[in-house]
Image (cartoon, grey):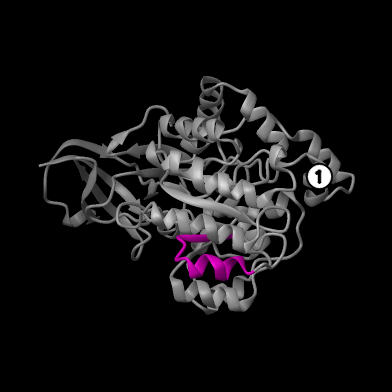
Amino acid sequence: MHDAVWLNARLATMAGPLIRDGALAATDGRISWIGERREWKEGARAEHDAQGAWILPGFIDCHTHLVYAGSRAHEFELRLQGASYEEIAKAGGGILSTVRATRAASQAELLSLAQRRLRSWLAEGAAVVEVKSGYGLDRDTELKTLRVARQLTGVTVKTTFLGAHALPEEYKGRADAYIDFVCDETLPAAAAEKLVDAVDAFCERIAFSPQQTARIFEVAKRLGLPVKLHADQLSDLGGAALAAKHGALSADHLEYTAESGVEALARSGSVAVLLPGAFYFLRETRLPPIAALRRHGVPIALATDHNPGSSPLSSPLLAMNMACTLFRLTPVEALAGFTVHAARALGMQSSHGTLELGKAADFALWEIASPAELAYAIGANPCVGRIRAGNSDPGS
């Protein structure tokens, strides 16, 4: 006897062909039966009529900076007047502006802000959201933001330590000393509190060098933590190849990645995470190497990159539309980017990302004619239900 079954459903499993008249059952929070409705002969304690809705795996946003305080709306105006992202950062704005506000906020304030932001993801059927630190840049605030991430409710949260996000003001001109601090104090302290699922860094001219990034990755490896990387967003520093060398779960951004970097990702099995919100908001013109990623078979994930400075985007649906419109991804690629490939980018492919037996019963119901509509419509939200661990979520 199954706990619950959804009948009269159309299923996009992301693991095989579409099922246009299907059934899906869940038991103990896992998918316990899936297939054509005519083949369903078993029983369930609760029976739900999906009324012809499409059921897809819950979305996975594999790259966000959700925990922070403050706003950077004034920087948006500066960019419209011609200032670049790098110019704003070098003038003391950018990430450091958010760092100052986040340091000043209490843990309770940060939790309230982040939980409120998270509502947008819940409304659009999200099952998993990755949340990075990186707006503290001191020991106490980095730990504070990671504790907040661990307290968020409504979705599964995967935390990422991003202490190497920017050089804090108190370490100006002493980048190597700051990397010492991250490697010797902040990262080990966060790991000791079990606040970290993965480790990230921003490898860029305005942030940290490949050599400094490699030092952090070596410490992560000693701590038994997987790594990922903000790579080649503003210039080609060989970030993709560096990520691949260290067996990274993912390399993210990739606008300036050369074909050699794509080849390295293909060899390592790392996922390419594209972030169309940042590309759009910063009015970038250099496209990620989509053709090369396809040619070499690198899995392409998508994410909102939600953050207050370069991608204040809270909608996976809009991110999919942007990826199709700006990067020329197909709707199928966009859907895979927020499901099966996003799961792999977080090391969760055994439990999430597809509708298959034994995987988490985390899925959403959509009132649409075909799955492609999710990447097509702008501003609409046809989500009519969100199921978490086999139970309807009234907060979605």
Q: Nearer the viewer, residue 74 or 160?
A: 160
Q: Is residue 97 above or below residue 40?
A: above
Residue 187 percent location from the top left of the image: 48, 44
Residue 142 percent location from the top left of the image: 54, 36
Residue topped by disc 1: 88
Residue 345 percent location from the top left of the image: 45, 57
Residue at the spot x=49%, y=63% of the render?
A: 332
Q: Within the image, what quadrant is residue 367 found in?
A: top left
Q: Nearer the viewer, residue 170 or 55?
A: 170
Q: Which residues are magenta?
A: 238-253
Q: Is residue 350 above or below residue 49?
A: below
Q: Is residue 329 above or below residue 260?
A: above
Q: Quadrant of the C terminus?
A: top left
**Amino acid type of the residue tagged 1 in the rendering:** Ile
**Magenta-drawn stretch contains 72:** no
Q: Quadrant of the N terminus?
A: top left
Residue 318 percent location from the top left of the image: 60, 47
Q: Horizontal placement of 105 versus 132: left or right?
A: right
